Each structure stands twice: as structure tokens, then as C-alpha cells.
Image (spheres, rainbow, N blue to C red):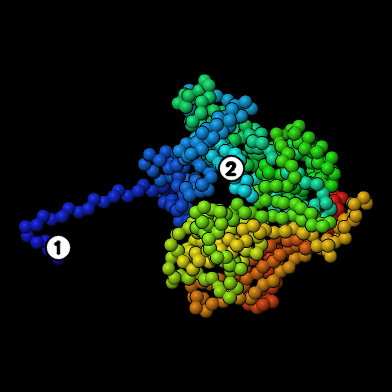
Amino acid sequence: MPTSTHHPPGKKRPSPAPREPPAPMQVSRTGRVIRPPRRFNDFVAFEALQQPERELQPHPVIAFKTNSDPDTLYYHEAMKAPDAAQFREAMQKEIDDHTSRGHWEIVARSDLSTGTRVLPTVWSMKRKRRIFTGEIYRHKSRITVDGSKQRYGIDYDETYSPVITWPAARFFLILSLIQDWHTRQLDFVLAYPQANVDRDLYMDIPKGVHIPGTGRGTHVLKLIKNLYGQRQAGRVWYDHLTRGLKELGFVQSSVDECVFYYKTSVFLVYVDDTILLGPNEKELADIITLLQTKFNVESEGDLGDYLGIRLRKYKDGDQTVLELTQPQLIKSILEDLNLVSKEGDKHVVKSHQVPALSTKLITPDLKGPKFDNRFNYRRVIGKLLYLEKSSRPELAYAVHQCARFCNDPRQSHGEAVKRIGRYLAGTADKGMLLRPNDSTLHCWTHGSSPKPADALFDCWVDASHAAEWNRASAADDAATAKSRMGWVITFAGCPMLWASKMQTEIALSSTEAEYIALSQSMREVLPVMALMKEAQARKLPVNA
């Protein structure tokens, strides 16, 4: 029998609250509802940033991060910034450079065939700062294509583009210290547009600038050169660079695709930031002149700021030492963690002597309070991972412990990240020293013919069987039964590669855990050994 809700007489029945219309769902061709992963909740579609006045509609492609580096701005943000005039000047310079170099041609929209896709343009603004001092030395405006609108198989195909691995880069840097080689840092100016596009692509005329004889509603730009923002832009540039280097006589490494040999010199490539090193200074100068016949490349002198790392070479007695520091990145991390004073000139918290306590294990802590989002946990972990992999190996264990819980951080995990920050607050100016150990090599004196240095190549590996076992949390966290392993690979006593991570399977004994760690570390050792043998075959002064 149906029942009714009692309502007092004489009183008007309240009208039900209006329901919000359900948000439209993205549906695949098979009828499956498409939902973006929860880890992308911090992202929004590109239209939200370019046209904030428009009502947002769900977008199948999540394109840009909203809480990025404050020195990286979009067009509407830069135009409201105090230094908007400098950005406008940089924008016009960017357009003039592309126009004068013939990177595009103007096409009337009416001349396009039916169905031709015109890609949106995006302004990417950046304040370039010096790594050591933090001062702004240039305002950079780069016009890019919104690659999120490209269609696979029509606008692009392959996108993979390799970069040099850190073990290979450190190996040759250490070798240059042992042999007292000369080094030069090169930069390819407007690297991507030096290559031709691999297919017909059209884009809108960018906002905020005037190109004579055009209008945003009546004309588009047909790309002739490879422009930033395309999904395949990195691969097109890499193919162009590799092809050009081979035509000039460079020999590509069969071990690392971004290592090239030319006579007695070595060329290391990371997209458009490169290092040239070798024993003959005149040969390096000739190579730079040779490269300038085919590419627009500039020499930036000896090693300096490279990939966000400050490289400082100095003499300690008769020995050459290379120091790797990242003070600007550490400052950014401390600002994210609110561990810097408002003036930004000194740290206001007491520092810790170690980044993590070996006696305190970090568990999933599922019953503990959720992280209060006082800082962006995932972004800070990303910065810490780059810091650890580049110049601070002592952070490996502490950072990996915190990185395991990015998907569901708890308050205890946030405190562990803050502890790492307090440790960095007291060691912000510290970094890694590459100082070849005299006891492990026999270098030949200046004036004699270059001969191989008998430098020891070592792999130090260890495992701790079920060291993080916690009976209380074992029911909720199967990883507590796994063993932790770590290794450091050194050449002439200098670290080349390191890691601290959990094993993927559960070892049943200490012996098994040690063998698993040895097997994992050898997967890193073998490519380095192959690179050393290749360098020896090229008559470089190294014994493999």
C-alpha cells in the first residue's frame, strides 16, 4: 500500500529543490563512457585558460596544468603582468623571426579544401632566470601549436624522440675530467623550426600581433617549418638533426642514440642543448664552424647552466673537479613547501641533518588523516625526483618512500616531504662533486701521448630482505613484505647512476633478495659497459 509523507495543514508544501542537469558524458564508439583518471583532476582543458569567460564543456583531451611555474605564463596572464611590455616585445620578435626565416606562408581560409583542420595557436611565455642568482635575464615568448587538437594518423604518426641518458652523459664528463679534455656547451637557436614539417599543417594567426596582409578571420598560416607544440615536433627535429650530423661526418653511437663521435671528440645531445668535448681545442672550434654550415647553432663557452643544473669546473691542486648543483630548483621546492621567508633571502626553519629517519618506516597509513593539500604533493615529488636523479643521490631513499603514495597521500606522508624540505633548507648550496679518485686510475702526464686511464668501473649493490615488514599494516599493504634494493654505479670513484626502490616480487630469503637486486642493477650496468667498449673501439682513452 503506498504511503504519503504527513504535511501539517495550513502550510504551503515546499517545492523540491531544482536538480542540476547532469554533465554530458564523453562516450566512445563502442558506447563505453570515457572518464579521465582521477590523477588528472588538477588539469583542465586548454580552452579554460585561453577563454576564461566561456562556460567550460568537458574535453576528452586534458592538455595543460593550471598551477604551473609562476615564471611560465599564458597569453592572458602575461598581458596582465607588470612586465607585459617586455612580453609584447618578445612576442613581436618571435613573429618577426618566424616571418623572416620563412617558417610559414599566408593562406586565405577560402582556399582551404573542405574538412581541412586549422590548429589553434598558443603563446607560451617564460621569464628566463639564471640558475645561481635567480635574476631574470630574458623574457621569452614562443608561439606553439595546440597539439591536443591533432588526430593520429592524419596530423601525426610517430612521436617518440630520444634524449641522452644521464649515465652516458656522466661517463663522458668523468672521462673529460680524467683526461683534462676541453668542453664546450652549444645551443641550437630556434631548434625545432630548423626542420621542415613532415606533412601539410595549418594554424590560426596568433593573438596579440599583427602580420601585414592578414586577418584572424580571413587567413591562416600554412606551416613550412616544424613548429613547437606539434605532437611529432620533437621527433621531426631529432630526425633532422641526426640526418644532418651524419652528412657532416659524425658517427652515431649504437648504444646511446644521442651520442655522436667526430674524430677524437664526442657530441652529447639533449634535444637542442648539447655538450661538445674532446682533447683538442682546435678540433672543437673546427667542429663548431662545421655545424654552423648546416645548423643555426651558437657556442655558449665552457660548461655552465645545463638542463637546470649548474655545472662548475674548477681546479683542486692538480686535479679538475666538476660540481653539480641546483639551487634554483631547491628554492622552488622550498617555496612550494612554504619553507622560505617572505623576503626570500633566507630559510626560516630549522634544518635536519638527514632527509629521512632510517628507524621510521613510511606506510600507506590508510587509517590516518588525509593530506590537507597545504602544498601540491605530486608537483613537489616530481621536482624532488628530478633533483635526486640529477645531482643529489643522497635523497634517493627518502624521495622514493614519499613518491610511492602520490595517488592517495596522507598527513604523515606530507610531513615526510616537509622533512626532506627542511633538510634541503640547510643544504641548498650543496650538490654532487665529480672528483676522479687518483687511487683507481693511472693518468699520463701532459706532453705524453694520450693513453687509456685504468679507471675502475664498479657497481655497489645491496638488498634488505623484508626490511620494511610491518605486521600491523600487512593486511592493507602487500608491499610491506617486499624487499628494498639499491645500487650505485661508479667510474673512477664518481657516481654515474644510482637507485633505491622496492623489488617487484616478494623474495623468500636474503639470498634471493640479493640476487634480484644484482639482476636489476646489471640491467643498468650492461649498457654502460657497452658504451665504454664502443668508446674504446673509437680509440678514446678508456679501458673497458
Q: Is residue 32 visible?
A: no
Residue type pointed to by label 1: Thr
- Viewer-nearest residue: 359 or 529: 359
- Viewer-nearest residue: 352 or 114: 352
**Residue drawn 66% across the image and 59% down it:** 430
**Residue 299 is drawn in which quadrant?**
top right
Residue 31 in percent (x, y) is at 41, 49
Q: Is residue 437 visible?
A: yes
From the viewer's perspective, is 488 left or right of 544?
Answer: left
The label on residue 136 is 2
Residue 18 in percent (x, y) is at 23, 50
Residue type pointed to by label 2: Ile
Residue 301 in percent (x, y) is at 74, 42
**Residue drawn 49% across the image and 64% down it:** 414
Q: Is residue 468 above or below residue 111?
A: below
Q: Quadrant of the C terminus?
A: bottom right
Which residue, given by chain and number where applicable, does mark 1 sit on?
A: 5
From the viewer's perspective, is 134 left or right of 286?
Answer: left
Q: Quadrant of the N terminus?
A: bottom left
**Residue drawn 43% across the image and 72% down it:** 367
- Viewer-nearest residue: 152 or 526: 526
How many labels sit on residues?
A: 2
The residue lying furthest to the left in this view is 10
The residue lying furthest to the right in this view is 448
